[in-house]
Image (spheres, rainbow, N blue to C red):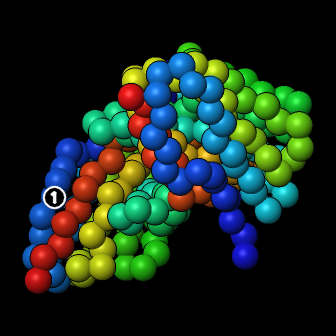
Amino acid sequence: EAQVTQNPRYLITVTGKKLTVTCSQNMNHEYMSWYRQDPGLGLRQIYYSMNVEVTDKGDVPEGYKVSRKEKRNFPLILESPSPNQTSLYFCASSRRGAGELFFGEGSRLTVL
Amino acid sequence: GNSVTQMEGPVTLSEEAFLTINCTYTATGYPSLFWYVQYPGEGLQLLLKATKADDKGSNKGFEATYRKETTSFHLEKGSVQVSDSAVYFCALGATGGGNKLTFGTGTQLKVEL
């Protein structure tokens, strides 16, 4: 089954404790992206990757890092989480230039 | 830059009512347009899309027409069901191709018996 898998689905952590949200896709897509969803703001892009070892900032990259060492994986790293990073995070992937995105089920992060 | 404006929710309808969710956009060029749906506790799923002016996207009884003259892509359904209760997002593709989607803020739909 074609899918985008994120882990963990739910996480409660404390300010400053480094965490990683993993994302993996099995569709051989070149493009992968992270979004955060906040009430009244819709989805905003954090980072994206056009291919292995190619990453770039989206609209709200501050406080986040990513890496793309393998085509299927695109982890989101919060080096020192803060309460304003409490949000629902989505990973998405697509073929290059396709437009249509395939989304994971989301990771709800709470930073205390 | 590109932007999307959707009507605010929540929208509450009775089953079998007619649905319209308004979406307008600002963009340079002629981007593709999308509607995504998010059911409770799930990720977003593509509902329908249109790639050029006057195209009509349709799926599961939902329709939307790409109107260049009014820069709109309104979502419609003739008869909603309780199972249509979800959050609906209008999205704008990158001009000239590419992968980035710009999303509206989402409209929550509640359908009651």
- Rendered residue at 69%/45% (across/down): A22
**Vertical placement of residue B99 versus B65, above or below:** above
Q: Quadrant of the N terminus of chain A?
A: bottom right
Q: Is residue B97 visible?
A: no
Front in this rendered view, residue B112 or A72: A72
Q: What residue appears at the point 62 percent right and 26 percent down from the top-left corner?
A: A18
- Across and down, in percent, residue B105 comes to 34, 40
Q: Percent x, y for residue A9? A: 53, 54
Q: Residue A86 occupies which quadrant of the picture?
A: top left
Residue drawn where x is 49% and y is 44% of the image:
A11
A94 is higher (above) or lower (below) than B45: above
Task: Report whether A103 appears left or right of A50.
Answer: left
**Badge 1: residue crowd in 10 Å (few <14, some 14–19, many ≥20):** some
* Mark 1 lies on residue: B11
Residue A101 coordinates in the image, percent (x, y) = 62, 53
Q: Where's residue B94, x and y in %?
A: 61, 36
Position of residue B89 relative to residue B61, above or below, is above
Q: Which quadrant is home to the C terminus of chain A? A: top left
Q: Is residue A70 above or below residue B3?
A: below
Mark 1 belongs to which amino acid?
Val
Question: Which residue is pictured at 46% across the width and 62% down the height?
Answer: B42
Per the image, label 1 sits on a secondary structure element best described as strand
Can residue A104 be seen here? The reply is yes
Q: Is residue A98 left or right of residue B16?
A: right
Depth check, front residue: B13 or B32: B13
Q: Chain of mark 1?
A: B
Instruction: State how many labels appear.
Output: 1
Residue A38 image-quadrant placement: top left
